[in-house]
Image (cartoon, rainbow, N blue to C red):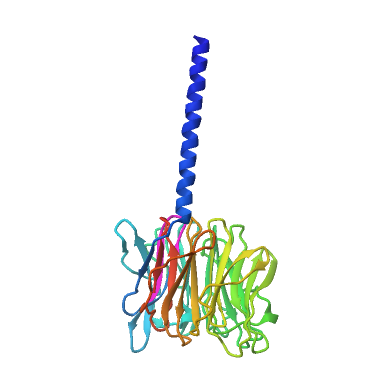
């Protein structure tokens, strides 16, 4: 009986091992199919007079949208609004007003930015001009209401023209911006909250002032999973050096790495985008000489890869990037001649092995004047583009 039961036990063990092996193989096959399949790309146009969409998908699986709505078209006055995507009904929630008073429509370089902290609160920052101030507001954890906006940047506000950026890491909330009327001395400043935005520490210079800063160029920021703050911005040296830089700030250590060089004796009115993939690698996309580039940050090395068609003679501008959990990438940008004109929406998708993927036609899809596109990867691996 003992030998029989022992023999049956071995059989059962072998059967269990076979079942586990089959499950692992099936799972690997599913992952492989997901990684190599064509991700779905959904494109949505903003409603009339709703411009400058910004999309974000958080760790709780929620998809957020903030945008500016012109409510007095002639005077270009309006408010900043928030919506949340409801995937079960494929609709957006009713809008919630973030700003407490109307402000003049910002240019494409001065659009509002947002981030979500570990408690689920949404933090937003935007530029107002009467008086000039970067206004900050945060929501409750359910994102059902927003606090009265605060102008918490007091000391270094001179020359405010482009956007400020907000990034979160656990209970930290960081605001970064550029200040200074003289482009040769203009640089990045920062202030950080360690209590989810309740209070903020002092304003401090974190940029390399010797590099200068492009006054009418936007920039992006993000925390790494280690708590390192990264800021991608365009410097301004000697009147014609409009190079892309990556600023790193961690504890008391600060450094700046050159991303890409651009000799140009005028302000390019450019924007850039930064995102973390599922492996916590940092990806950046930007414009140089009218072309769109991307790169993954690898240590201190950044190797630009051209995204937009090299043959195009029309300026490519305002790139944004999103990456899903399978490693697929989608980059969206505008193609147009003017600095502020919306142009035509363009897309480029890549698989996990950097292979190019098909994208839907965007012919005659035109972001509004003073606006640009936004893109986000959703929980199911699909991408949402709004323009």
Image point 62% across, 65% down: which residue? 297
Q: Residue furthest left?
A: 89
Dominant secondary-structure state across the stretch colored magenta: strand
Q: Is residue 308 visible?
A: yes
Specify the quadrant that holds the C terminus.
bottom left
The answer to whether residue 164 is above or below residue 236 is above
Magenta region includes residue 120: no
* Coordinates of residue 1 in the picture (x, y in percent): 49, 9
* Coordinates of residue 93 in the picture (x, y in percent): 32, 64
Name which quarter of the figure residue 98 lies in.
bottom left
Image point 37% across, 84% down: which residue? 77
- Left or right side of 62 for 174: right
Of residue 309 and residue 90, the one placed in the foreground of this image is 309
Q: Residue furthest front?
A: 311
- Left or right side of 221 for 38: left
* Coordinates of residue 374 in the picture (x, y in percent): 43, 71
Of residue 220 and residue 303, the one placed in the foreground of this image is 303
**What range is drawn magenta here?**
55-69
Number of dots carrying numbers: 0
Of residue 335 and residue 193, the one placed in the foreground of this image is 335
Q: Residue furthest top?
A: 1
* Coordinates of residue 40 in the picture (x, y in percent): 39, 61
Of residue 205 and residue 112, the one placed in the foreground of this image is 112
Name which quarter of the figure residue 204 lies in.
bottom right
């Amino acid at each position: 009986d003992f030998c029989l039961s022992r023999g049956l036990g071995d059989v059962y063990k072998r059967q269990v091992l076979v079942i586990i092996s089959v499950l692992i193989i099936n799972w690997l096959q599913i992952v492989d199919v997901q990684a190599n399949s064509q991700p779905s790309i959904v494109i949505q146009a903003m409603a009339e007079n709703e411009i400058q969409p910004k999309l974000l998908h958080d760790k709780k699986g929620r998809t957020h949208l903030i945008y500016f709505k012109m409510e007095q078209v002639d005077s270009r006055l309006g408010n900043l609004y928030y919506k949340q995507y409801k995937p079960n009904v494929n609709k957006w929630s009713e809008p919630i007003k973030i700003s407490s008073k109307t402000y003049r429509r910002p240019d494409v370089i001065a659009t509002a930015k947002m981030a979500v902290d570990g408690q689920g609160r949404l933090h937003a920052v935007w530029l107002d001009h009467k008086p000039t101030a970067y206004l900050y507001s945060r929501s409750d954890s359910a994102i059902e209401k927003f606090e009265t906006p605060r102008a918490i940047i007091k000391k270094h506000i001179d020359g405010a023209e482009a956007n400020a950026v907000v990034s979160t890491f656990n209970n930290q909330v960081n605001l970064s911006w550029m200040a200074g009327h003289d482009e040769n001395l203009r640089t990045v400043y920062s202030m950080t909250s360690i209590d989810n935005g309740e209070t903020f520490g002092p304003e401090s210079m974190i940029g390399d002032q010797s590099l200068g800063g492009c006054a009418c160029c936007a920039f992006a920021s993000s925390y790494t999973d280690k708590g390192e703050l990264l800021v991608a911005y365009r410097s301004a040296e000697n009147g014609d050096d409009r190079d892309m830089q990556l600023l790193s700030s961690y504890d008391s250590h600060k450094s700046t790495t050159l991303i890409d060089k651009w000799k140009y004796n005028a302000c390019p009115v450019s924007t850039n985008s930064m995102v973390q993939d599922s492996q916590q690698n940092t990806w950046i996309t930007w414009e140089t000489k009218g072309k769109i580039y991307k790169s993954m940050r690898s240590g201190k090395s950044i190797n630009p890869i051209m995204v937009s068609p090299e043959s195009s003679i029309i300026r490519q501008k305002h790139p944004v990037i999103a990456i899903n959990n399978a490693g697929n990438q989608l980059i969206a940008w505008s193609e147009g001649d003017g600095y502020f004109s919306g142009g035509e929406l363009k897309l480029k998708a890549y698989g996990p092995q950097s292979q190019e993927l098909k994208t839907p036609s965007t012919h005659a899809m035109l972001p509004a004047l003073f606006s640009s596109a936004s893109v986000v990867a959703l929980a199911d691996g699909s991408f949402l583009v709004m323009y």
